[in-house]
Amino acid sequence: MATAPYGVRLLVGAAVTALEETRRLPQTVITYPMTIVSQFAQLVMKMQQDVADLVNRGDETLDHLFPPKDEQPEWATFDEDDDESDDGSDESGGDTPRNGERLTEGRFALYSTGEPESRDAPEPAPTVDEAPAPAPGVVAELDYESLTLAQLRARLPSLKVPDLEALLAFEEATKARAPFQTLIANRITRASAKS
């Protein structure tokens, strides 16, 4: 077979390629919107990076021209500035922990396990008439008295409503810690709504 001239071969090749691309067009048209969206997103991210780079350069230049002042506003107080008031007195009623001590009452006692410490006088021992009621079985089963609030929260979903009510009654009769009472009461409400 004789070789066709270069121009004819070029035209035939272009025609075949155009015909193949026309056949594939329905499949490639589907990807065009995604391609356009991804290219647009890439362009926007590049512009954001360029703007952030310009802002950083501006900050560096302004820091060199006008060095920042290391002044602290008079209304700002920090723990380090409060060293002179560490004598143990606290204007807010003594609820803030000092020198690593662990408070067992007040707003910081959410995860405490101990009895509330009385700052005034110890509670009188119960008399024969005020003997504490025996603890329900669920208290011993959970080792309730040694649980923190977070540990109790993890164990409550496995309990049934009667056990929850027994725990709430026990808490009210003994330590009466508000966070524990609220947690148990909320769990009782949710468990009752499900059943």
Image (cartoon, grey):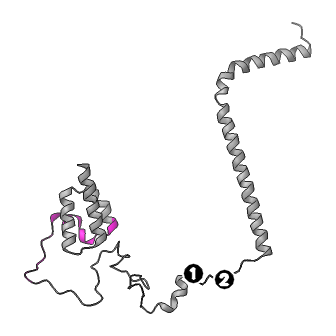
- In the image, residue 5 sits, relative to residue 147, either above or below, namely above
Mark 1: secondary structure = loop
**Total numbered circles:** 2
Mark 2: secondary structure = loop
- In the image, residue 52 sits, relative to residue 41, either above or below, namely below
- Residue 71: mark in rendering: 2
Of the residues shown, which amino acid type is indicated by label 2? Glu
Of the residues shown, which amino acid type is indicated by label 1? Ala
**Quadrant (top left, top right, bottom left, bottom right) of the N terminus:** top right
Q: Is residue 120 magenta?
A: no
> Which residues, given as a range, are shown in magenta?
127-150
Where does residue 48 sit, x and y in percent of width and height? 71, 53
Position of residue 45 in the picture relative to residue 144 (left or right): right
When asked about the image quadrant of residue 12, the answer is top right
Where does residue 6 sit, x and y in percent of width and height? 91, 16
- In the image, residue 77 sits, relative to residue 181, either above or below, namely below
Report the residue marked by disc 1: 76
- Separation of marks 2 and 1 at Cα, in angstroms: 11 Å
When asked about the image quadrant of residue 136, the answer is bottom left
Where does residue 186 sit, x and y in percent of width and height? 29, 60
Q: Residue at the location (25% across, 54% down)?
A: 191
Q: Earlier in the sequence, mark 2 or mark 1?
A: 2
- Residue 141: mark in rendering: none
Position of residue 82 in the picture relative to residue 146 (left or right): right
Position of residue 7 in the picture relative to residue 185 (left or right): right
When asked about the image quadrant of residue 123, the answer is bottom left
Badge 1: few (under 14), some or many (20 or more) residues near its Cα, within 10 Å?
few
